Image (cartoon, helix red, strand yellow):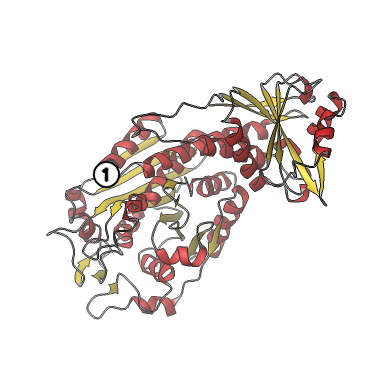
Amino acid sequence: MKYALNSHNNPATDSQDCVVIPVFSEDKKVILSNAGNQLDKASAGEISSILDKGDFKANTSDTQMLYDVAGIKASRVLLVGCGKSSDFEAKTVNQVSQAASKTLQKTSIKSVSCYLSDSITGKPKSTAITQTIIGFADSLYQLQDYKSKKKDAPSLEEVCVSLSNGFDESAQTALDNGIAISEGMKLTRDLANHPGNVCTPTFIAETATSLANDYKSVDIDVLEEADMEKLGMHSFLSVSKGSDEPGKMIILQYFGAKNKKQQPIALVGKGVTFDTGGISLKPGANMDEMKFDMGGAAGMLGTLKACAEMQLDINVVVVLAAAENMPSARASKPGDIVTSMKGITIEVLNTDAEGRLVLCDALTYVGKYNPSIVIDAATLTGACIVALGHHICAVLSNDDALANDLMDAGNTIHDRAWRLPMGDDYKKQLKSSFADLGNIGAGGAGTITAACFLGEFTKDYKWAHLDIAGTAWKGKDATGRPVPLLSQFLINQANK
């Protein structure tokens, strides 16, 4: 798909196959945008005459295709409902862009000129431009690697984001950012959607190596189980040892700052490529979705790709803790005690609380890079879905400013996070009779106690934890989150 900016002060003469026009609903009245009014004038009122019939309500994501409208060069005009104009902002642009894309995919249209971002009034258009690209790309995504009969590709080949008053460097940057974030989301979705017999820890390492080879700014190192044994990562190994698939600790470094020695921002991802629960076996229903348990690692790799594409002026280190959690004669048993790289002993009370066991060693290891900020992402707890559902991820942090920066980034790009508390009262729930920590807490608040567990390994950092258990996939399809949130966060950090 080709995405471009287009400056056109008269959409009636736009040469694309179709023009996409936002339409608003105010007090039960349908109101055309500025671009829509120009089309209506060129058509001698034909569009307003159609709207006056009352069939098109202009509710958010409603669409109506008009054909061969008099006085308009494009053969089609797609009206897209956007609700109240006062509520029309970046998140709405994403939603209505997806609606427009779904409608366009049912047609033979090859090129469109989209005037959605142009209708943002009194607000910066940059985020809306980015959201237009993300919305279209998200809707167009499909993985057909395992289909013997593949669907025909959509006819749509080009999307022009059209602005009536020209565009400047900030608009071009917004478009480029949207393309980069979309590519990062696609990588994340592809990785997560692959089945567990394909997407193994080795496959993630190979994918990460391929990414590093694509960018001169990215270096890679992969720790094998023998390397981790020497480093004392017995917490990680207590998970991976139950599988025939060897675990991998994958480290990628992005050098984007002018000062190569500038402290990096560290991104750590849980990469459990399939989670049976181990000896604490999960129920069989929907266990196929446990291929998504590497969503944190997939999201961090996708974020790194977006960062490299945007050529952000920062340094970033990414650590992916990739393992498979299987029951076997070698697997950890409930009650086993292991020693982490940090020297903290852990009683494995439940082998299905394995994500924190691989993450704690990764979070310790990343300290060798002297990071300025450490953020981990993990599909860590079902309790997070109970608390926040599938719309918002949880953020827990030992630093108020960092937590606020992450939530602000999420609100900007509509990949939202909500902060949950931490504290000693919750930490007490991790008490073990025989070790320094239990790997699960008693008494509820599972998302918080999981973060408190990780917090024992991040005391030396400015650190935040994202629990993406409710947002990394929807139904049977990965979402590409939290790539938008983290990409926007990195953009903001680079611009400080």
Left or right of 109, for residue 389: left
Q: In this view, does 46 lie above or below 271?
A: above
* Residue 68 rendering spot, x and y as whole percentages: 74, 21
For the residue pair 239 and 35, the one nearer the viewer reads as 35
* Residue 82 rendering spot, x and y as whole percentages: 71, 44
From this viewpoint, which residue is outermost toward the left? 329
Residue 311 in view, yes or no: no
Q: On the image, which quarter does residue 65 sit in? A: top right
Task: Say which residue appears at 59% left-offset and 44% top-offset.
Answer: 495
* Residue 407 rendering spot, x and y as whole percentages: 57, 57
Q: What residue type is labelled 1?
A: Thr
Q: On the image, which quarter does residue 115 sit in? A: top right
* Residue 133 rendering spot, x and y as whole percentages: 59, 35
Left or right of 329, for residue 292: right
Label 1: few (<14), some or many (≥20) within 10 Å?
many
Q: In this view, does 426 lie above or below 196?
A: below
Left or right of 45, for residue 487: left
Residue 95 in view, yes or no: yes
Task: Say which residue appears at 26% left-offset and 51% top-offset.
Answer: 323
Number of dots carrying numbers = 1
Name the residue that disc number 1 marks. 200
For the residue pair 5 and 456, the one nearer the viewer reads as 5
Task: Say which residue appears at 33% left-offset and 37% top-offset.
Answer: 207
Q: Is residue 348 above or below residue 233?
A: below
Secondary structure of the residue carrying numbered label 1: loop
